[in-house]
Amino acid sequence: MYEKKIPKSFACGMAIIMEIIGGKWKSYMVYLINKGVRRPSELQRAMPSASRRVLDLQLRELEFHGIIKRVIYHELPPKVEYYLTDFGASLLPVVDAMDKWGEAYQGEFEALMKKKEEPVAL
Amino acid sequence: MYEKKIPKSFACGMAIIMEIIGGKWKSYMVYLINKGVRRPSELQRAMPSASRRVLDLQLRELEFHGIIKRVIYHELPPKVEYYLTDFGASLLPVVDAMDKWGEAYQGEFEALMKKKEEPVAL
DNA sequence: GCTATTAGGGATAAATTTGTCCGTATCAGA
DNA sequence: TCTGATACGGACAAATTTATCCCTAATAGC
């Protein structure tokens, strides 16, 4: 996956959940997989700005961390589906809270950021 | 702060909250500041494994994003205190949920990771 | 024969984050 | 005078994450 050189220390709860869903698209993938978007190609269509390579890598990590389970159908063209494990499902309330906060405060956040750009009055 | 080359797109709520507390120590700092650990030197003593430089950088970003407010006392030796803004305080339930999840599932997570290291039976 | 679909890896580059080291300045105390 | 505390920034290096490009392999459709 990549040999880490700095040991991770999971001193607080945040460090653990960040290790798991800290990737750029991971939390959104958990969200989508739970919504029934199961196949890699579907996931990519749902997140067009994510590169397919990175989605694959992050799916591997979610699988490695026990959040999702990969089900392989031996068909052609290949078919794979991802499902949340029970462990992964336990994340849903948290992911949901994060998403809800983001939706609720997006306006305020963007307004704040916009103010930074305004020229300072003289 | 650093000129970003890849534009951020905040298509979903998760992306926003990740932008804000995605840094390695940010969520923990929000947590600590709320607990009353206000001065940079105190924060560092509370997180000895974080480098002071990075704490400063991430404090700047939290301030930039409107999460914390810096109060400067014009004294010597210098004194600075950080406080959560109202906007920052709105994050608390989410940060708390993340932390609680981490604490609750740390055992399960580590057990899962440990299994990966076990030799496969033949 | 081309093209597209499917899932994914190898190699590598670019972007970003984190860390290290040193320097500014001021005052207090040994 | 030397050391330590305080807060912070510059310059740079190292680690990590994300992105780009190209490859495999089987089948359906034109």
Image: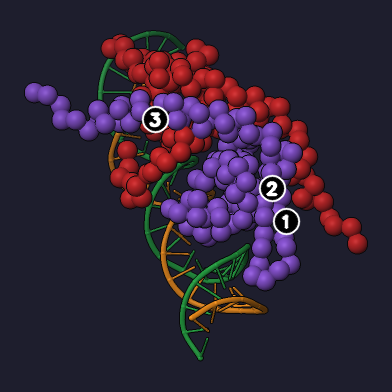
Chain colours: A purple, B red, C green, D orange
Q: x%, y% of residue A88?
A: 68, 39
The residue that disc 1 covers is A71
Task: Give the distance between the C-alpha atoms of the residues marked 1 and 3, in whole angstroms.
Answer: 36 Å
Task: Give the distance between the C-alpha atoms of the residues marked 1 and 2, in whole angstroms.
Answer: 8 Å
Task: Give the distance between the C-alpha atoms of the residues marked 3 and 2, in whole angstroms.
Answer: 29 Å
Q: x%, y% of residue B109?
A: 72, 38
Q: x%, y% of residue B39?
A: 43, 17
Q: Crowdedness of circle 2 by 10 Å Cα count: few (<14), some, many (20+)?
A: many
Name the mark on residue A106. Answer: 3
* Residue type for callout 2: Tyr
Q: Crowdedness of circle 1 by 10 Å Cα count: few (<14), some, many (20+)?
A: few
Whether residue C26 sits left or right of residue D30 in the image: it is left
The chain letter for the residue carrying disc 1 is A
The residue shown at (78%, 40%) is B111
The residue shown at (69%, 37%) is A89
Whether residue A17 sits left or right of residue C28 in the image: it is right
Q: Secondary structure at mark 1?
A: strand
Q: Residue furthest left?
A: A122
Check if mark 1's residue and mark 2's residue have beta carbons within 8 Å. yes
Q: Secondary structure at mark 2?
A: strand
For marks 1 and 3 on the same chain, the one whose residue lies earlier in the sequence? 1
Identify which residue, A101 or C20, lies in the foreground: A101
Relative to A39, residue A104 above or below: above
Name the mark on residue A83. Answer: 2
